[in-house]
Amino acid sequence: MGDTLLVGLNGDDSVRELKGAGRPVNPEADRAEVLAALGCVDAVVVFPEKRATRFLEAAQPDLYVKGGDYRAEDLDADEQAAVKKAGGQVKVLKLTPGKSTSAVLAKVKT
């Protein structure tokens, strides 16, 4: 979708705040390393906040892509404003059913 792929990754504390106790399953350093190893990823930035607003203000992306577990109308208004202020746009990808950490954890519990 672009020439450079910069991945913003929630840090461990913000994942716990967003997802609850027992999350993340893998620590931020491991998650960042796996993402950085992907050939399509140019860089990974771990941000400590619950929302990516400060990261987006600094990165000023042309395109901010969110996973399909979000709906465009439910995205954080400050994140959207940061992207739009830099002249970028927001896109939400389609969700791939059953391909999420939450789905894997649910299977493990049964």
Image (spheres, helix red, strand yellow):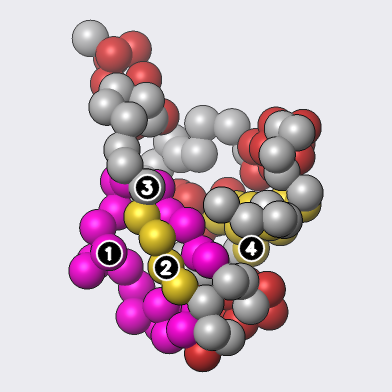
Image coordinates for residue 107, horizontal then vertical, percent: 29, 13
Amino acid at pointer 3: Leu
**In terms of sequence position, does the residue under pointer 1 or pointer 2 come before the other?**
1
State left or right for residue 98 relative to residue 47: left
Residue at the far bottom: name it. 85
- Mark 3 and mark 1 lie on one chain; the one further toward the N terminus is 1
Element carrying mark 2? strand
- Can residue 105 be seen in the rendering of this structure? no
Q: What residue sits right under mark 2 in the picture? A: 90
Residue 73 sits inside the magenta stretch: yes
Residue 47: numbered disc: 4
Q: Are marks 1 and 2 in contact (CB under 8 Å)?
A: yes
Q: Which residue is mark 1?
A: 72
- Cα distance in 3D space between marks 3 and 2: 10 Å
| Residue 1 can be seen in this image | yes
Q: Residue at x 63, y 78 (%)?
A: 60
Q: Secondary structure at mark 1?
A: helix
Q: Earlier in the sequence, mark 2 or mark 4?
A: 4
Which disc is residue 93 wearing?
A: 3
Q: Position of residue 106 (x, y in %)?
A: 27, 21
What range of the chain is rendered magenta?
A: 63-84
Compute the Cα span from label 3 to label 1: 10 Å
Q: Earlier in the sequence, mark 3 or mark 4?
A: 4
